Image (tube, coloured by chain):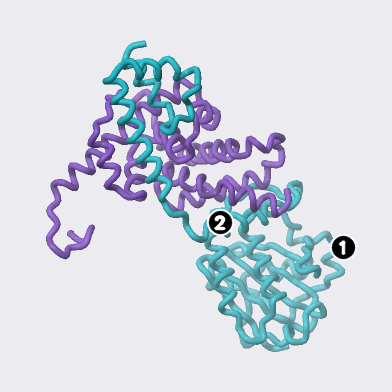
Chain colours: A cyan, B purple
Amino acid sequence: MTSEQARFVLQACRPHGQDAADPAFIEALAQADRDPELRAWLERERAFDSQVSGKCKQVAIPASLRASILAGGRVSRRPRSAWRSLVGIGLAASFALFFGTMAVSRLSGSDAYLDELVQHGLMEMTGPHPRGQPLDGYGELGALLRDPSQRLGTAMPIDLNRLREIGCRSLQVAGKEVFEICFRRDSYYHLYIARRADFSCRECEIEPMFRERGEFASVSWVDDQHVFVLVSRAGLDAVKKVVADPAVLAMR
Amino acid sequence: MSSAVFTQLVDAHYEALYRFALSLARREADACDLVQQTFYIWATKGHALRDSAKAKTWLFTTLYREFLRGRRRDGRITAIEDLPPEQQDTAAESVDQVRRLDGVQVMEMLQEVDEVFRAPLTLFYLEDLSYQEIADTLEVPIGTVMSRLSRGKSQLRAAITRRANHSAQVVQFPGMRKGAAS
């Protein structure tokens, strides 16, 4: 083995002696013991490697990264067969920020379950998602959701039993049944519908509430029978274009 | 996989994966995306890995594959055949030059290394992986790993020397902040 060959091999040798017994390095290391010039080079090489290694490990980790990964993991650990495709979860960071903002921006009258419902809806927006029922199957409600001239509000033709019968996707949020209908106008939306009876009286008093963080936006409102949450990744303006004026949403 | 096990896995590896991703992708946001995507794939497919001891290698391999996939999509992958050979000597000054840099600056220098050499080099420096483990992670032959480490180190030294020379030419006026001149 020439000195050049030994140098080539020893560049792959870790600097803290972990590879001293590795057969691939034994001959080159023995040669370095015999050759002062090669030994001096190896010492410089190890010092250089130790410095670079130590410095690289000083690089700070973004504070929100861990929370984002765990949020994404929660989404993806649902039954695999239910999902039709993989969608990137790079949005999870924004998502965590959205939740953080929500935590400090709750208004009086709002409640934890409603917040959880909104969060759940947003989680669904960021992860892989099952193909929903075609809107045709929803009859009058489907036509309403599809029609861009119609605004969603407090007098929608909703029959939860009918939704169940036609196989509308339902979720359990805090142990309560919530139906999900996905639809597209100029943007993509998820509408969540829960029974108003599942909410406490205080929650039923809430005013329509819009929330936004980055591209995530939502609005929640209630009518006599139901609680609604509409979520989108197209921003608050897109959400506002789909629902009735807040003053109308507040009428019940 | 339970939530607790997943959390343990994240806690054990996400920092190292992030640094690896940062060296590859160069931008913090892209690095975060790569790490999240890697754990996402783990959460959806990782249960198929029978040997949990190989989880770390699996994660690094997956992240690297995702990075390459993105690069291929962008059409910016580097062909190794096009890269010139580099000299292999380590000058004593290189060690002192590194000593004067902070972690972010060294990472910036590492990011100047050609991508094909950067991946094994990062695993070598950040993860203390052996050449065999690097070969397993990147799915390349051992000889290729040795060659890439050698070339990568040469490029890294060259980048550090360039920076040191450039810094030596810049005369700072008293009170002027770094990067304020323009």
- Residue B55 vs A176, above or below: the answer is above
Res A241 visible:
no
Q: CA distance from mark 2 to mark 1?
A: 40 Å
Q: Which residue is mark 2?
A: A66
Residue placed at 33% from the left, 15% from the top? A34
* Most foreground residue, B78 or A93: A93
Q: Which residue is mark 1?
A: A165
Amino acid type at image mark 2: Arg
Q: Position of residue A127 (x, y in %)?
A: 64, 55
Residue placed at 59% from the left, 69% from the top? A99
* Most foreground residue, A123 or A154: A123
Within 10 Å of disc 1 (Cα), the crowding (few <14, some 14-19, many 20+) is few
Residue placed at 85% from the left, 67% from the top? A162
Q: Position of residue B43 (x, y in %)?
A: 66, 47
- Locate residue B96: give its quadrant: top left
Amino acid type at image mark 1: Glu
Name the quarter where the C terminus of chain B is drawn. bottom left
Within 10 Å of disc 2 (Cα), the crowding (few <14, some 14-19, many 20+) is many
* Most foreground residue, A202 or A188: A202
Q: Is residue B101 left or right of B61 when viewed as pictured?
A: left
